[in-house]
Amino acid sequence: MNTDRRGFLKGAAWMGAAAVAAGCISDKNAPGFGKGGAMHGFRVAPLKKVRVGVIGVGSRGTGAVRRIAQIPGCEVTAMSDINPKRLDENQAWLKEHGYRAPKEWSRNGDEDAWKGLCDSDLCDVVYSVTPRPLHAPINVYAMDHGKHVLQEVPGAFNLEECWATVEAAERDRRHCMMLENCTYGEEEMLAFNLIHKGKLGEIVQAEVGYQHDQRSLQYKPRDGRFWRIDRHLHHHGNYYPTHGLVPAGRCLDINRGDRFEYLVSMETKSASFEQFGRDHFPATDWRHSAKMVKGDINMSMLRTAMGRVVTLIHNVCTPRPYDRGNLYMGTNGIFRSYPSLLMAWEEKTGDNGAHEYFPADKALKIKEEYKHPFWKVAGEISKKVGGHGGMDFIMDLRWAYCLQNGLPLDTDVYDLATYSSIVELSERSVNARSKVMDFPDYTRGGWKTAHPFTVDEIDMSKFDFTGGNANGKTAQST
């Protein structure tokens, strides 16, 4: 496959509906960038009231509804879910807390009813928290119907879906940002701040990933839908690459001065999931004898144009503590935040200051001194609202702030496509005995001149939080 081919692949399973409804594009009629041009630094006129439609209000979507409703200037105006009970639960919470009721779609169980939300004029932004097969169709359909998109991870599942999402954003001039909450984790942002202040020198290598024991979750899904374990049953590769990698990409200025050029991927045999199935289900249950295609642990190495290397691990099968890695090696020192916060660096080259990690009390002092501005100004309120220790609310607060003030979003559609590409590229590499796979350049060379990431701020005075908590005066309050 030519990784630089753009547009829809003829016969793609989800192409038809979006193409018929919105008008498809092809290589022939979309040379170069889409009609509107490149999306680096893209911004829209300030949206003083951000009307949000949430598609998918399961556990993650429910958290999103509650967080967004509490952000001044934001309102959840629409919701869609195949399960009416979930809609009822969210409506009850909104009513209990004094918020207006959003309009609903999907009460009849129609899996395509989310399109009605996108078709409506009730929202400016689609916040998508659905099973992964719907991510790319929602990206394209929503943008083609005038909506900005905030999409759960990964933002797409193969290269054609990535190109289709990029083309739609360029054509429609709409934001399409991936909701990678770990980018806004307190220690991830600490690393970002330290690196941009030069404490570690030039970063040459990172080790990141997602290691999270999900055996019970995948074999016993709460909603009875086995879309998670489907990847293990039928595919190799890393299908969930972003939690560790997107924060690393910001530290390395990926797509803004550097880019991922190629990767190689390798994985272990499958053992842990199959053992779990044998030990927890009777012989009459399909899970007892299920055979997995995907190995327990996938390991990929990504090399950048500037010569940096990132080691990326995916492991949701083995019994072990949660870990995102977060290790950065620079010419002056090292940072890591798992299993605990560890760092060391030299003040002068060769002074041996990094031969041992700093004592815990010094590390905590550095953590406070170099805390990222987002966490300095919004950390307390974010921890009150919650969502993975507050990073979910920091993430939502930030995109809302950018939209309300006409600023570019922190990451763009090229980032969504780049990181999502790993799903297909890692599988193709494993299938080819760890052959090198080239990354598409979705920026078409724009990474060379795009402005690097910066340590930005949130001016909380532009929000109207009252009483020192998030449940203040909002656009949604009755």
Image (tube, rainbow, N blue to C red):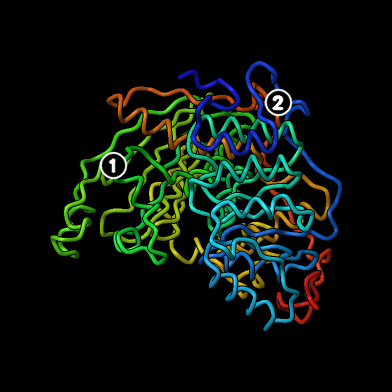
Whether residue 127 is situated above or below residue 301 in the rendered picture = below
Residue 449 — which label?
Answer: 2
444 relative to 211 in the view: left or right: right
402 relative to 244 in the view: left or right: right
Q: Quadrant of the C terminus?
A: bottom right
Furthest toward the left, the residue is 283
Residue 166: x and y, percent? 64, 33
Residue 418: x and y, percent? 55, 34
Furthest toward the front, the residue is 108
Query: Hey, what amino acid is under mark 2?
Result: Thr
41 relative to 310 in the view: left or right: right
Q: Quadrant of residue 391?
A: bottom right
Q: Secondary structure at mark 2?
A: loop
Whether residue 166 is situated above or below residue 461 in the rendered picture = above
Q: Quadrant of the N terminus?
A: top left
Seen at 39% across and 38% down, the residue is 311
336 vs 84, nearest the viewer: 84
Seen at 26% across and 46% down, the residue is 296
Mark 1–mark 2 distance (CA, rounded to whole Å)? 39 Å
Seen at 30% across and 24% down, the residue is 432
Crowding near the residue tagged with mark 2, few <14, some 14–19, many ≥20 C-alpha atoms within 10 Å: few
User: How many marks can you see?
Assistant: 2
Is residue 366 at least partly visible in the picture? no
Seen at 34% across and 51% down, the residue is 229
305 vs 170, nearest the viewer: 170
Residue 210: x and y, percent? 40, 50
Crowding near the residue tagged with mark 1, few <14, some 14–19, many ≥20 C-alpha atoms within 10 Å: many
Query: Hey, what amino acid is under mark 1?
Result: Lys
Residue 449: x and y, percent? 70, 25
Dot placed on the residue nearer the N-terminal end, 1 or 2: 1
Residue 312 — which label?
Answer: none
Residue 294 — which label?
Answer: 1
